[in-house]
Image (spheres, grey):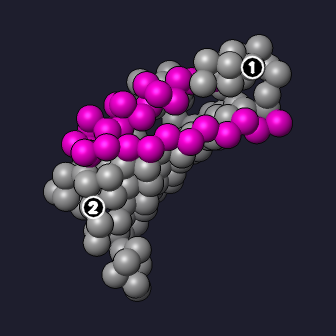
Amino acid sequence: MEEIITKNINKALWGMSSCIDLYQCDPELIRSPEAVKRYIDEIVEVIDMKKYGPCHIENFGEDERVAGLSVVQLIETSCITGHFANQTNNAYIDIFSCKAFDPEVASEFSKAFFKADSFELKVNERR
């Protein structure tokens, strides 16, 4: 992981994409647009990014398997997106940025914020 962050800091990468899958989150938090907005405000600070424009949050999904809140927040160096699945109480958050950040810090913060039992993190180099 440190190698990817170092490459990103040294501009050897165009950016990196972190996929954070949170399992068994607090159902009240993942169903609350206010909590999701607060999460966006806080995660932006935690990973030292700058928001670009408003946060967009919608509750939708015709299929109960995927119904829930979705969020999109542009940041000056790309975007943060997320989907919160009502049926499973799982959350799927993607952070993409050409500015370096620590995906493990973002994952641990996300897990704590949504009171998840566990998480999986996948980080992709973007060239």
Judge from the rendering whether residue 28 lies leftward or rightward of residue 94; answer left or right. Answer: left
Mark 2–mark 1 Cα distance, whole angstroms, equals 34 Å
**Range drawn in magenta:** 100-127
Residue 37 visible in the current orientation = no
Is residue 99 visible in the rendered image? The answer is yes
- Disc 1 residue type (three-letter): Lys
- Callout 2 touching callout 1 (CB < 8 Å): no
Residue at the spot 40% in from the left edge and 66% down from the top edge: 58
Where is residue 33 shown, x and y percent of the image?
28, 56
Q: Which residue does the numbered mark 1 point to in the structure image?
A: 7
Instruction: Tell me the quadrant of the picture where the N terminus can be found.
Output: top right
Quick check: 93 left or right of 11? Answer: left
Question: Which residue position holds label 2?
Answer: 89
Residue 111 located within the stretch drawn in magenta:
yes
Up-down: is 63 above or below 81? below
Q: Earlier in the sequence, mark 2 or mark 1?
A: 1
